[in-house]
Amino acid sequence: MSYHEIRRQRESYARKPSLQVRKLTHDYCEFVLQNTDTSMANALRRIMIAEVPTIAIDLVEIENNTTVLNDEFISHRLGLIPLVSNLAGRMIKPFEATGDPNEITDIVFSLDVKCTTDSTQYVTTDDLQIDHQFPDVAPIFYRDESQQEKPIVIVKLRKGQELKLRAIARKGIGKDHAKWIPVATAVYTFMPDIKINDAIVEQMTEQEREEVVKADPSGTFRYNQVTRKIEIEDPERYRYDNELLNKVDEIGKTGAVQITQRQDCFVFKVESTGVLPAEEIVRQAAHILLQKIDGLAQQVREAVGQQASPTSDHTGHTGTTCAVGELPVVLVLVPALESPACIRAPQLLLLAREELGAGCIQR
């Protein structure tokens, strides 16, 4: 197979993912991802959960604790407090530190509260003293002047009880501990592909058509009294419960309605815990995914580089050809993608196919 044939084959596999935002607030993002497959959608979802860096309390030094909660319980509660993490991109983890004075690894909080009244005293996130070097890193809704959101309760004190401690917040990811997860919800659903066979529907009585529509609890379908047809109200309401399909089978009209999951269209719903804007979480996840793809492409290039021979064509694209097993592999360097695309003849290497699809996302 010639280089030009391989290149044409590559272009036939190349995908152009598109993303359409439906709803966007500070804490919520809903969007539709199309023209890609489940592997890419699930990779994006998992990265949003486990690999977008945030800031959380990681070390607690307790000086005095006479509350009803033990030290470990309070430390655990402090670790789960969501901290505004816009600074996470500038921070590094402690094991990555090189000794540079400009490096940011630790952000220190302190707490010193004592109950001196007969009534119960609530110790909340508003009682934490933030690090004045990094005033932007604070618990969400920290001392909210509008008082629309209440602070998070850490512990309750009775008269004479005291809590004094020092807490150190550090950068991390959800893969290390759940306290660094930036999302409360990050899910996607497959867009339904619904087809109604009008020829079979016409064989139903009016009562049967109404029964079929009522069998679907999600309200995806409606019965048009004027046209006397079953119509699709909103396909995204469908929950794949098979109630309608079971009813169709029950009345002996199998095939009147066909419902499948589209494998190239996904509806994402992302809800932030408040540590980062939902939009930023999605952007960072896409960036991390692209970095992983570029890293994989680089490793493939290095793995076959010793046996490679250079090739080129009239378009200015350059590449290398070598043998992997019994099949030739061509690494095509495409300037527009800023990363190599890997092609196996006669089949496209699966991982490289993913690289081609993600490479079309704007950086």
Image: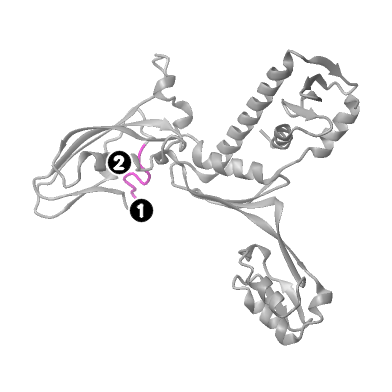
Q: Which residue is mark 1?
A: 149
How many labels, in total? 2
The C terminus, quarter of image: top right
Which percent across, then down, holds residue 60?
27, 33
Q: Is residue 316 left or right of residue 104?
A: right
Front position in the image: 26 or 258: 258
Question: What's the distance in space between the residues labelled 2 and 1, CA to CA?
Answer: 22 Å
Above or below residue 60? Residue 22 is below
Which percent across, then down, holds residue 287?
60, 33
Front position in the image: 22 or 266: 266
Q: Is residue 120 left or right of residue 350?
A: left
10 Å crowding of disc 2: few (<14), some (14-19), many (20+): some
Q: Residue at x 35, y 43 (%)?
A: 80
Q: Residue at x 66, y 46 (%)?
A: 38
- Magenta stretch, overall SS: loop
Q: Is residue 290 left or right of residue 226?
A: left
The colour style of the image is one colour
The magenta stretch spans residue 298? no
Element type where label 2 sits in the image: helix
User: Which amino acid type is marked by label 2?
Assistant: His
Residue 270 visible somewhere in the drawing: no
Mark nearer the N terminus (2 vs 1):
2
Which percent across, then down, holds residue 122?
21, 50
10 Å crowding of disc 1: few (<14), some (14-19), many (20+): few
Residue bounds of the magenta highlight: 138-146
Residue 239 in which image quadrant: bottom right
Residue 190 in which image quadrant: bottom right
Q: Which residue is mark 2?
A: 76
